[in-house]
Amino acid sequence: MKLLTIDDIATLLNCKKSFAYSLSAQNKIPGKVVLGHRVVRWKESEVIRWIEQLSANGGERIETAQQKPSSLPRMGRADLQSTKPAAASQRLSSPPSAKKQTS
C-alpha cells in the first residue's frame, strides 16, 4: 500500500495545492490516513479509484465550499459604481464648503 501526500494529490488532480487542501478539509478525498497530529496521507488505490469514478461520470466537477457558484454574474467596475448608496454619490458630487477668509 502506497500513501500519497497532499502534493501527490494535487499532481494527480492537476490542481493547486490549496484546492487539494480545501477538498481534504471537507473530507472529499477518500482513503485518508492520519499518522500523527499534523501528518495526513491518502491510500493511493482509493484515490485512484475515486479519480476514475469521477472520470467515468463524465468528468464531474468537484466543488468546494470556498468556491463561488459559477451561475452568479461577475461584477465589473461599472456595476460596482452603480451600486453605491445615493448619499455617498451626492457627497462626492457636492462642492467643498467655502473656507472662512481672514483679513
Image: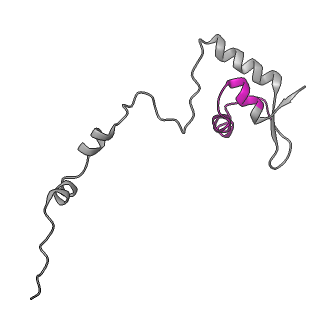
Query: What secondary structure do most residues of the magenta stretch adopt?
Result: helix
Q: Residue at x 68, y 38 (%)?
A: 21
Q: Is residue 79 above or below residue 93?
A: above
Looking at the picture, does residue 74 appear above or below residue 83? above
Q: Nearer the viewer, residue 63 or 82?
A: 82
Q: Looking at this rendering, what residue extends furthest in the front direction?
A: 103
Looking at the picture, tell me which residue is in the foreground, 103 or 100: 103
Q: Is 1 placed left or right of 64 in the picture?
A: right
**Percent coordinates x, y for residue 59 in the rendering:** 60, 15
Apparent side of residue 36 relative to residue 86 in the rendered image (left or right): right
Identify the image quadrant of the C terminus: bottom left
Counting every numbered tag in the picture gives 0
The answer to whether residue 59 is left or right of residue 36 is left
Tell me the quarter of the picture where residue 16 sits: top right
Q: Which residues are magenta?
A: 8-32
In the rendered image, the quadrant that contains the N terminus is top right
* Colour option used: one colour
In percent of width and height, residue 25 lies at 67, 40
The residue located at (37%, 33%) in the rendering is 74
Quarter-of-image position of residue 53: top right
Residue at 59% over, 26% down: 62
Residue at 18% across, 60% down: 91
Residue 31: in magenta span? yes
> x and y percent of residue 45 in the render?
82, 21
Most extreme residue toward the left, as rendered? Answer: 103
Query: With respect to residue 33, does 62 lie above or below?
Result: above
Specify the farthest residue to the bottom. 103
